[in-house]
Structures are given as structure tokens and as C-alpha cells.
């Protein structure tokens, strides 16, 4: 009998995505960036929403969690606040993040927890066969509404610290952006929001269109990602020209949620030993505060 | 009733303070409760308010007594009426022994509304407050002086309580209130009620130490003492005190109490914390509990531990937010899509709230499933005296956890491994060698999505059977009254104190009854079913329109022929005398039926 050096854990499954799906690039880039950042699989908590993109945690060695539809952000925040030593990465699609979960996106921008959020935006609902999504343009399946832009939403909130957009067709830049996002959260600087244009080859193949329309702000002379007002104005201009801004859109500074919420004199919630009465003195104080 | 020389010893008094919302009725009652508690009596308070900050009739009630009671009595000893409406609304509870202290700033006392013999002490508290302190709010403190004297409280003790209450609001506010209280004592002197010459006398007892606490605060503390370190909530009446208490105390212990953007965020943020191995709880009321349903079912499917507190209020929809009801029992027991197992516990008073929340926190961890605590508005918010919680009695039993050393010795780690008891050992994120997948999709032992029919059935059975095994250690019902009685009562939550007293009152009428207080509502335990079996009839008393508890019991095999449902859903709690009357009516019909049957035969 041979001794096993390591306990066997689950074997990551093969992605369920269609050949040519943009999500393959996202997965590859995420794995590389995690390796570069030296994140061990046991310290990675990868949470994903519902949709095609919401299966990525099955394909990577990690502590994986499949969230309820639209709820990946509050779940990820709960995990980060309970154990801030974990690298917490949330992933999902535009339907999950901008429709059913839009309220949580706003409040995650507001709270600025040090988690990375990767939104694989394909402008459609792929898993339910191609309905219009919150980012679909006017006319797609008779969609009467203009698509929304979550980067612009993020720019409008004063607490955002990291806003970037990548394109699955440009993996080199995407890798840099993913690396920067992880670096931002590993350093405890707050919420790293990375939207990836990730075409759905089956229901809405935007690959060629997007390749022609993306505009890299980093090549823009004088673009200052730390100037919120200027970033907003320049992104509006680019959009008005029919282009889609990509790159590191905004860098800001604001205290992270965990730095504000946790009592740093004590171990964080998940690292406390259950069963010990180490806080007995506070319990006694509680009781005496209700005595006469 | 009494002269100066034969003051009765105060052993059971109920005081109502009534006026308009914002008049401060609750403040007066809370201070009275504190004073009586400090005098060695037990107290119970109740609030009757509207869901608004100012305006509308508002009242608060306090009962002080010797012995153990957990409800407001049927008789009102003293009514402090801050306006005429206060008399109109409460005259029905008064009798010839009652005392009314009336603010006649707006007109003289409506004598025609009062029963004959009621003694009235009237003074223009509002006008005096406006004239001397320029703010009507101080009318309470003036009236307090008169009420305190009548009830036999010592001036010095009242002053101490004022200092305790108002000091934290600043020196100016404290001084104004003390001045107002002094005016009140002066008024009492003018009415001929000098210190020590009140209507009642308080027998100095050796005061046993008691906590003065509400159910919500007891739940919060039970969770904390059980090692709970993460809480999420969204403000909603009548559960907000759980959030507020934990926001004050949890951070001191390194814990987190988050107010989230909505209940969907609350339940999911709690799930995120629980995934890391942290003991976690949420608290809400009906509307929030409805919003949380998807998350609660997910806990069952993904086998994530969590305690969820439902402080029930009158529904459906927004209902009557400040009124008590027990109409979410179906939602707690049967709610959510799909089949999953859950545990539902039901405490009956603040002490029970503490110990059952400790138990709930342990059970959630041990069985990796949601555990619900069924509260109601009165149990949640009514303040009562209880014996100090014994921390040495708190047992914290961690669930099946694996650390890196445990994992090293294992061939494989599967998050959803099949085991004899259905509970799979858990390695928290961050543990080397414990990588795993958690999902609400049907999954195999590894946590990989699977629709394999054989696996599906095994996984469903694994999850459902856990609760069968838990039955042995779930909190048993408590039996009160005459064990040999053939007539039984069943009721949960705030009804505990009311039924106990009704059993006593019925005894005086010659009707022997007993009361079983179920403390686990789901799964239904054998002790409850056996109780129904051994009684000839059981009154299941509930604050809802459908008889939800009775139906849950019948669903689990209780004989429907033995169950008589006593229901109330008008937003008003039962009083012991009112409940007793309802039972006497039922019993008289029953006796007539027996006679009629005998004749026919």
C-alpha cells in the first residue's frame, strides 16, 4: 500500500461553455493571475452566481461556492468580513450582477470590501437561451431599452476604488487588469470591479463587433485614472463616439469595509475558536448592564 | 379601599400609561418597571403603539408582582391618562377599585366613562409643564411624582431612577426632569398623598437579583454566548432590537453585526460568513422572512448552518406592524420551494429565549441546517424580570469540523460525504487540503452538480434524515398544572404566561386543566402528540386566523376530534380573564352537549 502524500479533494470539472465562449479566456487569465499573486488554492474562496459564468468555481482548485441568483456579492462580503485572510473572488454575468443583483452592486461600491468581482458581460442571457439582458442594446430581440453601463455607475459613487474593463479577445491586457485587481484586494484597498466583455458565440456573437469598437483608455494621452470627473467625461466622450472604453478606468482611495467594520484587537470571526469562553468578561458586563 | 393606616401590601398591580404617540408612555413604564424590580418585585411590561413616532393613541402597561408571571393581568390598578382618549380607550379595564390619574389640562375628567367608585386624582400636568419648563414633554415627569407616591414608592428611589435614566441625555435634561419630578411630589402633597402614605405599601423584601430584559435582547445574548460571531439584519419591527443589541455587543468580542441594504443581502451575507465556519444568525419579521425564503431553502440544500429568528407580527403583507401575531408558523414549518429539513424552536419568555438560542446555535452547527426561532411581537419586545442567565450552564458544542491535521490522515475529503448520521464533516476555507464545492444545485459527494437519479435520492434522504436523528436532543415541551386533568392547553410564545394564569383562574372555577408548552414546533415531537392523546380535549390557543399550530399537530397525527382551536387575530393580546371566559363558554357548551347526548340515549 502506498501512502498518499495529499488528501484527495474534488477534481475540477471541464467547463460547460460552448467552444469559442469568451469565458474560457477569463478562466485562463484568472488562473494565471492567481498563480502570479501566489494565492494558494486553500486560501482562495471563489464564489459564482447563476448563469454560464456561474460555473467557473467548478473548474478551478479552490473553496468554491455557487451562490443564489444575483446574490454573489453579499455572500462574498460575508465571507471576507468573517475571514479577511481569505482571497475572495466573486464571479458572474451581466444578468446576475446588473439585473437581479443590481442593488447589491450599488451597495458593494458603497461599502468597498476588499473582494474582486469579475463580471463576464455578454449582453445576453446565455444559459436561458438568449433573452435580452440589462446590457443588451436597443433592438436586440426587440429590446426597447438602452443598455446600462456599470463602470459609469461605479464612477458616480464616491467610494469606488478600482474600476476596469477588459475584453476576452485581448487576453494580454485582461491578464494585467486581473493581476491589478487581485493586487488591489490583496493589499486591502477595497473593491476591485472588473467587467470583461466576453461574447456569447451561440446567442449573441459580438466578438467582431467588440474587437472593432473597444478603445483602450490606457493608450489615451493624458488619461488620468485617479481623476474621477475627468474619467467620467472622457468615458462619456468615447461612448458617444460609439466606442467601448476598456483598460484601467479608475483608481481611487477609500478605507476598505473590513478595515472599518472589524475589531482589529480581536481575531476575526472565523478564526475564533468555538467553544471557548474567551469573551466571558463581556458576557458578564452584558448581564450586569441588565441588573438593577 | 384603604386608609392611611391599612395600606395593602402591593403584591400584584398593573399600571397603564396612555396618551398620544410621542407622549413618552413607554419611558414612564420602563422607569416604573425598574423601580419595582429594584424593590424586589417581578415585573412584566407591554407596549401598545402604532407604527409611527408621533400621534395616534399609544399606551404602555406594567405589572409588578410577587411570584412568577409572564403577562399583563386582567385588572388595572392605576391608569395614568394623559388625555381624554386615554380614558375612552381604557375605561373597559377599570373597576371600582381602580385609580385614575388624569391630566385635566384639556378639560375635566369624563366621569360618565368611569365605573362607580373609581378614584380620580386630576391635575393639569401639561399646563404646568408648559408654564414652568416651556415643554410639554416634562408632563410625564410631573405626573410620575403623583403616580409614584400613590404606588408607595419612595421619593429617593424615584430620584435615583431618574438620574439613571436621564443622565446619559445630558445634565440639562436631567435637571429639568428632576425639577419636574419635584413639582409632581409637590402636587401629590397638595392632594394629600405624602411620602409613605400612598394607596399601597411596598413590603421591603430581600431583593433577589433580576435582569430586566426583553426577548429580543435575550435572543441576541444567547447567540453571542453560544459563540455566535456574525449577524446580519435589516431594520424591521418587532425584530430590530436583536440587530441593535448585537451591534452594541458583538464587535467587542471580535464579531460583526451588519445592517444590510435589504433582507436578501442579510440572508446571503450571513450565508457567506457561515461558509467560513463562523456561527451566524439573522433576525427579521414576516415580510423579511418571506424575502429570505430562497436563502433559507438554500441552507437546507447546501447544508449550511444558520439560525434565523422570526419575530412575528400581524400579517399578511405589511399587516399591523406593531401588533403581535403567530401567523408565520406555516411559513417556518413548510415555507420555501422544494423539500428540505429545518428545525423550529419556540421560546415562551425571555429566559427561555436565551437558553433556546444557545441550543439553536449549537443545533445549526451540529446538523448543518437552518434552525428557526419562532418569536412574536410581545415575546420580542415586552420587558420582563428573569433570573440572571447562568453562563456556566451554557454548553457550546462545535459541529463536525476538520482541521489540516485531521485532513492529513484522510484519503479523501468530500464536502457532502455520506455518513451514518447524514452529517458530513466540514473543513473551513483556508484549511490546507480541504478544497471543496458548496452548492444548492443537486450535487454528488464532491459537491459537483449531478442529476443522477440514484445519487439524487441518496442525497435527499441524507438531508431529510438528519432531522429524525436530531429529535432525541430537541428541546422537550414543559408541562404545567394538574397532571391528572383531562382538559389540556397548548400554546406557544407570548401565550405561555397567559395560559398559565388562565389554568389558575379555571382552577378557581372548579375546572382542572393542564398546559403543555411545546418548545420545538418542528419536527413535532412525541411528547406533544402524547399529551393530546392523554387529554379528552385540548384547547390549542393561537394568535392567527387559520389555526396554524393545530393544523401542524394534526398533520403529524394529533387526533382532530380532540382539538378545539381558540383563535385571536385582532391585534390585541389575550388577557388571562378573557381567555378564561372563552374557555368557560366552550366548556358550558360542552357540558350542554353531554347532557343533550344523555337525553337522546
Image (spheres, coloured by chain):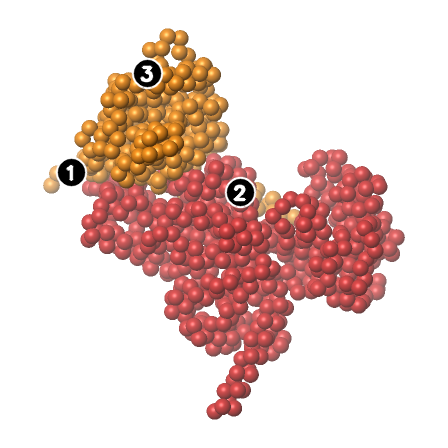
Q: Residue at x 70, y 56 (%)?
A: B16
Residue B327 image position (x, y, % from top left)? 49, 58
Q: Looking at the image, which is closer to me, B291 or A65? A: B291
Q: Horizontal placement of B114 versus A256: left or right?
A: right
Residue denoted by label 2: B235
Chain B colour as displayed:
red
Chain ID at mark 2: B
The single residue placed furthest to the left in the displayed view is A1
What is the CA distance from the residue labelled 2 to the residue labelled 1?
A: 55 Å
What is the CA distance from the residue labelled 3 to the residue labelled 2?
A: 45 Å
Secondary structure type for disc 1: loop
Residue denoted by label 1: A3
In front: mark 1 or mark 3? 3
In front: mark 2 or mark 1? 2
Chain A colour as displayed:
orange
Q: Looking at the image, which is closer to me, B399 or B56? A: B56
Amino acid at each position: 500500500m502506498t501512502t498518499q502524500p495529499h488528501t484527495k479533494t474534488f477534481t475540477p470539472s471541464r467547463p460547460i461553455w460552448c467552444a469559442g465562449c469568451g469565458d474560457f479566456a477569463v478562466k485562463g487569465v484568472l488562473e494565471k493571475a492567481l498563480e502570479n499573486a501566489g494565492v494558494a488554492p486553500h486560501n482562495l474562496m471563489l464564489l459564482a452566481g447563476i448563469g454560464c459564468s456561474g460555473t467557473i468555481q467548478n473548474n478551478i482548485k479552490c473553496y468554491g461556492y455557487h451562490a443564489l441568483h444575483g446574490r454573489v456579492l453579499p455572500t462574498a462580503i460575508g465571507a471576507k468580513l468573517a475571514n479577511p485572510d481569505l482571497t475572495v473572488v466573486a464571479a458572474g454575468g451581466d444578468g446576475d450582477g446588473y439585473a437581479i443583483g443590481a442593488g447589491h452592486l450599488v451597495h458593494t461600491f458603497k461599502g468597498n470590501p476588499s473582494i474582486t468581482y469579475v463580471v463576464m458581460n455578454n449582453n445576453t442571457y446565455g444559459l436561458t437561451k438568449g433573452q435580452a439582458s440589462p446590457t443588451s442594446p436597443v433592438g436586440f430581440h426587440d429590446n426597447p431599452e438602452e443598455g446600462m453601463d456599470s463602470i459609469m455607475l461605479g464612477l458616480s459613487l464616491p467610494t469606488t476604488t478600482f474600476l476596469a474593463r477588459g475584453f476576452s479577445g485581448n487576453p494580454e491586457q485582461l491578464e494585467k487588469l486581473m493581476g491589478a485587481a487581485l493586487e488591489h484586494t490583496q493589499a486591502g484597498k477595497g473593491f476591485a470591479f472588473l467587467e470583461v466583455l466576453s461574447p456569447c458565440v451561440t446567442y449573441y456573437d459580438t466578438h467582431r463587433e467588440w474587437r472593432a469598437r473597444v478603445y483602450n483608455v490606457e493608450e489615451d494621452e493624458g488619461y488620468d485614472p485617479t481623476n474621477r470627473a475627468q474619467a467620467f467625461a472622457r468615458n462619456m466622450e468615447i461612448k458617444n463616439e460609439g466606442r467601448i472604453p476598456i483598460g484601467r478606468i479608475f483608481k481611487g482611495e477609500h478605507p476598505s469595509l473590513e478595515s472599518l467594520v472589524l475589531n482589529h484587537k480581536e481575531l476575526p470571526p472565523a478564526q475564533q475558536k468555538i467553544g471557548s469562553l474567551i469573551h466571558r468578561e463581556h458576557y458578564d458586563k452584558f448581564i450586569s448592564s441588565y441588573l438593577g | 379601599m384603604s386608609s392611611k393606616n391599612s395600606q395593602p401590601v402591593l403584591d400584584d398591580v398593573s399600571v397603564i400609561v396612555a396618551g398620544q404617540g410621542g407622549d413618552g408612555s413607554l419611558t414612564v413604564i420602563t422607569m416604573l418597571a425598574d423601580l419595582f424590580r429594584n424593590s424586589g418585585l417581578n415585573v412584566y411590561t407591554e407596549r401598545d403603539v402604532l407604527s409611527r413616532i408621533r400621534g395616534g393613541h399609544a399606551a404602555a402597561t406594567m405589572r409588578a408582582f410577587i411570584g412568577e408571571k409572564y403577562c399583563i393581568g386582567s385588572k388595572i390598578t392605576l391608569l395614568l391618562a394623559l388625555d381624554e382618549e386615554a380614558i375612552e380607550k381604557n375605561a373597559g379595564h377599570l373597576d371600582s377599585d381602580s385609580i385614575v390619574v388624569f391630566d385635566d389640562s384639556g378639560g375635566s375628567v369624563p366621569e360618565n366613562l368611569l365605573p362607580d367608585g373609581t378614584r380620580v386624582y386630576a391635575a393639569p400636568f401639561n399646563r404646568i409643564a408648559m408654564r414652568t419648563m416651556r415643554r410639554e414633554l416634562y408632563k410625564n415627569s410631573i405626573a410620575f411624582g403623583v403616580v409614584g407616591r400613590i404606588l408607595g414608592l419612595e421619593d429617593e428611589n424615584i430620584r435615583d431612577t431618574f438620574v439613571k435614566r436621564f443622565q446619559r441625555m445630558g445634565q440639562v435634561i436631567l435637571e429639568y426632569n428632576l425639577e419636574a419630578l419635584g413639582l409632581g411630589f409637590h402636587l401629590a402633597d397638595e392632594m394629600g398623598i405624602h411620602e409613605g402614605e400612598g394607596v399601597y405599601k411596598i413590603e421591603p423584601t430581600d431583593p433577589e437579583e433580576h435582569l430586566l430584559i426583553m426577548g429580543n435582547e435575550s435572543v441576541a445574548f444567547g447567540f453571542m454566548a453560544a459563540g455566535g460571531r456574525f449577524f446580519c439584519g435589516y431594520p424591521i419591527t418587532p425584530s430590530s432590537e436583536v440587530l441593535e443589541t448585537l451591534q452594541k455587543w458583538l464587535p467587542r468580542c471580535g464579531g460583526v453585526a451588519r445592517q444590510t441594504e435589504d433582507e436578501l443581502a442579510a440572508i446571503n451575507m450571513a450565508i457567506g460568513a457561515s461558509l467560513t465556519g463562523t456561527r451566524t444568525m439573522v433576525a427579521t419579521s414576516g415580510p423579511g422572512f418571506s424575502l429570505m425564503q430562497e436563502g433559507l431553502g438554500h441552507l437546507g440544500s447546501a447544508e449550511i448552518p444558520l439560525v434565523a429568528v422570526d419575530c412575528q407580527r400581524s400579517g399578511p403583507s405589511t399587516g399591523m406592524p406593531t401588533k403581535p401575531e403567530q401567523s408565520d408558523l406555516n411559513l417556518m414549518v413548510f415555507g420555501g420551494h422544494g423539500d428540505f429539513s429545518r428545525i423550529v424552536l419556540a421560546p415562551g419568555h425571555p429566559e427561555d429565549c436565551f437558553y433556546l438560542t444557545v441550543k439553536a446555535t449549537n443545533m445549526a452547527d451540529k446538523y448543518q441546517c437552518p434552525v428557526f426561532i419562532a418569536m412574536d411581537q410581545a415575546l420580542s419586545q415586552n420587558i420582563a424580570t428573569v433570573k440572571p442567565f447562568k453562563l456556566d450552564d451554557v454548553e457550546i458544542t462545535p459541529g463536525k469540523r476538520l482541521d489540516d491535521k485531521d485532513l492529513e490522515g484522510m484519503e479523501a475529503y468530500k464536502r457532502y460525504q455520506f455518513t451514518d448520521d447524514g452529517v458530513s464533516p466540514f473543513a473551513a476555507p483556508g484549511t490546507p487540503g480541504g478544497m471543496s464545492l458548496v452548492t444548492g444545485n443537486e450535487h454528488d459527494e464532491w459537491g459537483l452538480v449531478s442529476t443522477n437519479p440514484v445519487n439524487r435520492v441518496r442525497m435527499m434522504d441524507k438531508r431529510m434524515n438528519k432531522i429524525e436523528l436530531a429529535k432525541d436532543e430537541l428541546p422537550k415541551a414543559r408541562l404545567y398544572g394538574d397532571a391528572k386533568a383531562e382538559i389540556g392547553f397548548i400554546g406557544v410564545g407570548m401565550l405561555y404566561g397567559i395560559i398559565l394564569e388562565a389554568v389558575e383562574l379555571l382552577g378557581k372555577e372548579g375546572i382542572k386543566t393542564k398546559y403543555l408548552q411545546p418548545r420545538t414546533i418542528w419536527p413535532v415531537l412525541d411528547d406533544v402528540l402524547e399529551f393530546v392523546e392523554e387529554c379528552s380535549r385540548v384547547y390549542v390557543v393561537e394568535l392567527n386566523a387559520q389555526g396554524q399550530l393545530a393544523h401542524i399537530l394534526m398533520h403529524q397525527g394529533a387526533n382532530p376530534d380532540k382539538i378545539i382551536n381558540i383563535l385571536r387575530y385582532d391585534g390585541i393580546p389575550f388577557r388571562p380573564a378573557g381567555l378564561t371566559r372563552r374557555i368557560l363558554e366552550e366548556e358550558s357548551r360542552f357540558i350542554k352537549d353531554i347532557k343533550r347526548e344523555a337525553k337522546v340515549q
